[in-house]
Image (spheres, rainbow, N blue to C red):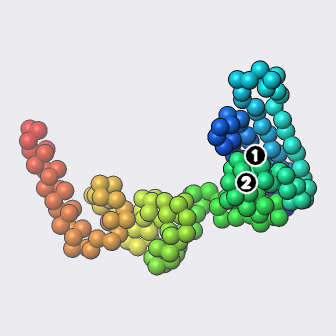
Amino acid sequence: MASWLPETLFEIVGQGPAPSKDYYQLLVTRSQVVFRWWKISLRSEYRSAKPGEAKDSHEEFLENSHLQVQIALIFGARILDYVFNLCEGKFDFLERLSDNLLLNIISYLDLEDIARLSQTSRRFAQLCTSDKLWEKIVESACDTITPDMRALAEDIGWRQMFFTSKLQLQRQLRKRKHRQGSQRDSQF
């Protein structure tokens, strides 16, 4: 397993399916799967119940069908599949990169590729439509960005600024300057 991975690969907490009030935690580290539970009940026979914990190595977890069924019931089949992949060493390294690093990488893609990437996940959809990304793209496409252009981009958004024609941008900049001039005149 890659040594630069954090010790905790995945963690989720949740309540058991109704009518249960029990709480559960699933923790996947580099070497083991930890499943913890806390019994919550008003019944006197469960009041003294202590929290429980089951620890398995990744290999043991892949063979432990009882624990797999519990995880599927509490957290769902999607989470169980994800934990299986982690235990088998199948990591989504791209998802582990920071937003700033991903924005830097995405800024070098063609527009068509950015559009396609935005359709792959919620995270990439947010990154591909973020003002930070489009600011980088506009800065790489333009020779200079004047303070007026920067102010306009902050008003309308960098993505909108990128897709607006030069003629429309010039018109919007003139309107903006005119409004600022008339506001200054009305203050005096």
Residue 131 found in image quarter: bottom left
Q: CA distance from mark 1 to mark 2?
A: 11 Å
- Residue underneath mark 2: 72
Residue at 9% from the left image edge and 44% from the top image edge: 185
Mark 1 or mark 2, earlier in chain:
1
Q: Is residue 15 visible?
A: no
Residue 92 found in image quarter: bottom right
Residue 16 higher or lower than 125, as above or below: above
Q: Residues within 10 Å of mark 2 (few under 14, many from 20)?
A: some
Residue at 65% from the left image edge and 37% from the top image edge: 19
Q: Residues within 10 Å of mark 1 (few under 14, many from 20)?
A: many
- Residue underneath mark 1: 26
User: Where is residue 84 shown, x and y percent of the image?
Assistant: 78, 61
Q: Secondary structure at mark 1?
A: strand
Amino acid type shown at disc 2: Ala
Taking 141 as reference, is 188 left or right?
left
